[in-house]
Amino acid sequence: MIAQRCSFIIILALLGTSAPAFAQTADGVWAGAIAVMGQDLGIMVKFTTSGTSTAATIDIPQQMALGMPLSKVRWAPPAVHFELPAGPGLAIFDGVVKGDSITGTFRQSGIKGTFHVGRLATALVPVPVVTKEPPPPYTEENITIRNGGVTLAGTLSVPPGDKPHPAIVMITGSGAQDRDEEVFGFKVFRTIADHLVRNGIAVLRCDDRGVGGSTGNLGNSTEEDLSGDALAAVSYLKGRRDIDPLGIGLFGHSEGGLIAPLAATRSHDVAFIVLMAGPAVRGDRLILYQIEEMMKGAGTSEDQIAAALASRKEMLAAVRSGKGWDAILMKNKQERAASLGALSAVQRASIDSAEFVDSTAEQEVRSEQSPWFVSFVQYDPVPALEGVTCPVLALFGEKDEQVPVSLNQAPMEEALRRSGTKDWHVAVVPGANHLFQSAGTGSPMEYSSLKKEFAPGFLGTVTTWIGDRTGLGHAAPR
């Protein structure tokens, strides 16, 4: 997103169509750029017409965003209009069709810019060479699960053979994640699932609430709600003949590492849990630690770090008490206004200062008041960890900057020592970041540039540990 180079977040998209003299539909690929605050952002848009409606997706390679769907499309040449709800607010685009090109304007949260796009001739569009991979040696089934008024859509992958298989339910980390938990092209959960299924372990992974085929609203969901989703998935697996009802476990990554122990304390149907970078301290403490360590790593002065921590502590106090939000909003607006002074004259000319300050500050407060954030800030994982009675494997990445070993390993071990299980193991994967890739610094800024594979030993450790506890033995992981 543009936030990679600016002090604010903008999600951009565009819609185009040709004049009737060129074609009656917008079908095809259009390429161009968005100009905002003195910068150009390359884009490619693909249109598909069905009957009287037109669907469109956009690629923004610089932001690692591919296939983003466009909505509220209105194509009435020469006028073109579409809108995209995004992080800081609604992005509104209006364009004019002229021949084989479209030019127009957009605005979002006080930010103003222009866009232009032209149709690519079919002969000029490179056709990617696709190597067809053989089908996997297991079955995959799209399924849906109900938890109260929420429907979860997912994929169940099952090894071959008639014997009931042990199984694991995957629980994603924070933020809106699909069933693959894809981060900058690295399909974290899909890669883990493929490895486990090839080694005899069935895997169920679902889209988060409000993502993909799932309904519901993630921002309005608490840790209790999400643990209920995990247990609904366990209940679904128990009803299948191809799954061993006594061998169903949970696999939680990051925030999923909070959900898995909580779910395990609520049901005896959970046979084991695997925690991948699962936090062992309260959310507010983790947030402050992350801010301090990341600012230190960026070479920020001690005074700036102290100011940032003080500001976040005020916000976290408001989250816990429910009081003081008017003062927080006013401070947010002051900080946004001050940030405008660091922009160039060209950048400032592209901004409606009043709208930018108000909309971005208000959006931040709304996100901090959401049920999910309030729940995360106040949730203490220790009681659930102490209440676990099933086997536990907890893995941390040595270079993880989001759930750091130095903050979480000792509390994890202390809690599990006091728990109801004697079968637990905590280990650190050398050189691994939060996604368990081999990393340089471990910073999230590296994610997009790293190999889309796990650090050596990670998959083998998980597979062997689960196999030992589900009767699969010590078969060498494939």
Image (cartoon, grey):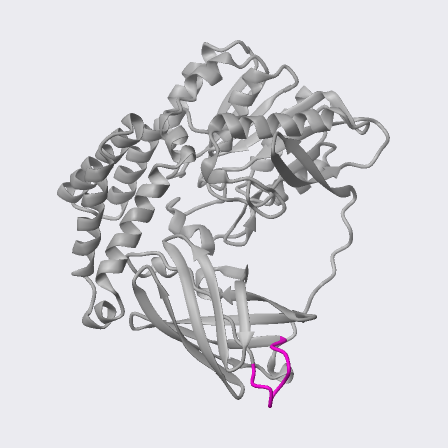
In the image as oriented, which residue stretches furthest toward the right? Answer: 162
- Magenta: main secondary structure: loop
Find out whether residue 73 is within the magenta segment.
Answer: no
Left or right, 455 with respect to 1, comes to: right
Q: Evaluate whether residue 288 shows in this view.
A: yes
* Quarter of image, res 465: top right
70 left or right, relative to 6? right
Residue drawn at (71%, 28%) of the image: 236
Q: Going 60% across and 77% down the picture, which residue do you hit?
A: 26
> 145 or 274, which is in the foreground?
145
Task: Name the residue at 43% across, 73% down.
Answer: 94
Query: Measured from the top left, where is residue 319 in percent x and y?
Result: 30, 31
Q: Position of residue 244 (x, y in %)?
A: 76, 23
The residue range painted magenta reads 18-27
Indicate the position of residue 98 as horizontal and vertical percent values: 49, 87
Task: Work out which quarter of the rendered image holds the N terminus and state it.
Answer: bottom left
Residue 424 relative to residue 311: left or right: right
Q: Is residue 274 left or right of residue 400?
A: right
On the question of residue 466 being in view, the answer is no
